[in-house]
Image (spheres, rainbow, N blue to C red):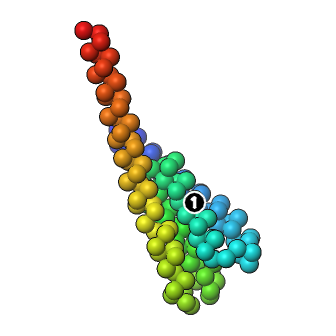
Amino acid sequence: KIVNLFTRTLYQILLAVGAIAVSSLILSEFRGFFSTSVVALLYLLVVVFCTALGGSTSGIVASILAFLMFNYLFLPPFSTLFVEHPQEVRLDLVLIAPVGHRGAQVVEHADHLDVRAAVARALGRAERGR
């Protein structure tokens, strides 16, 4: 059971790291083409994707990595985590960082609803079988 949990968590982390790495490579090629707002929203889309596919751990890891990569690659001075104009960080703080957490809550709630529906179906079948 512990090995299963470890494997699942490792999958979730690798999904987030891989998705953010690939999206960062692609987006960095278009650094001058997209505005920072568009890049932040594209990272947001990747975070939502990771959360939907991998669950809470994946969403939270993806949101942290997206925040760091956005600052590192797209805010001047480039290739540092120092931000020249702090007002540029507001968008990614407001959008990217909380989405992993909130998305994780939504996914977990949906999973809980799926379990409740499965239990209700099983109870219905058991009642009909009597």
On screen, residue 25 versus residue 64, left or right, reads right
Measured as percent of width and height from the top left, residue 50 is found at 53, 54
Q: Does residue 82 appear in this view?
A: no
Q: Does residue 51 appear in this view?
A: yes
Measured as percent of width and height from the top left, residue 54 is found at 49, 49
- Residue 27, image quadrant: bottom right
Q: Residue at x 34, y 24 (%)?
A: 121
- Residue 113, image quadrant: top left
Name the quarter where the N terminus is drawn.
top left
Q: Residue at x 32, y 34 (%)?
A: 116
| Along the line of sight, the residue nearer the viewer: 78 or 5 | 78
Q: Residue at x 38, y 36 (%)?
A: 114
Question: Please, what secondary structure does the residue beneath circle 1 have?
Answer: helix
Q: Residue at x 51, y 87 (%)?
A: 86
Measured as percent of width and height from the top left, residue 102 is found at 40, 59
On screen, residue 50 versus residue 112, left or right, reads right
The 10 Å Cα crowd at callout 1, few under 14, some 14 to 19, many 20 or more, is some
Measured as percent of width and height from the top left, residue 80 is found at 58, 83
Is residue 98 positioned above or below 15 on the image?
below
Name the quarter where the C terminus is drawn.
top left
Is residue 59 positioned above or below 84 on the image?
above
* Residue at the disc numbered 1: 45
Amino acid type at image mark 1: Leu
| Along the line of sight, the residue nearer the viewer: 22 or 89 | 89
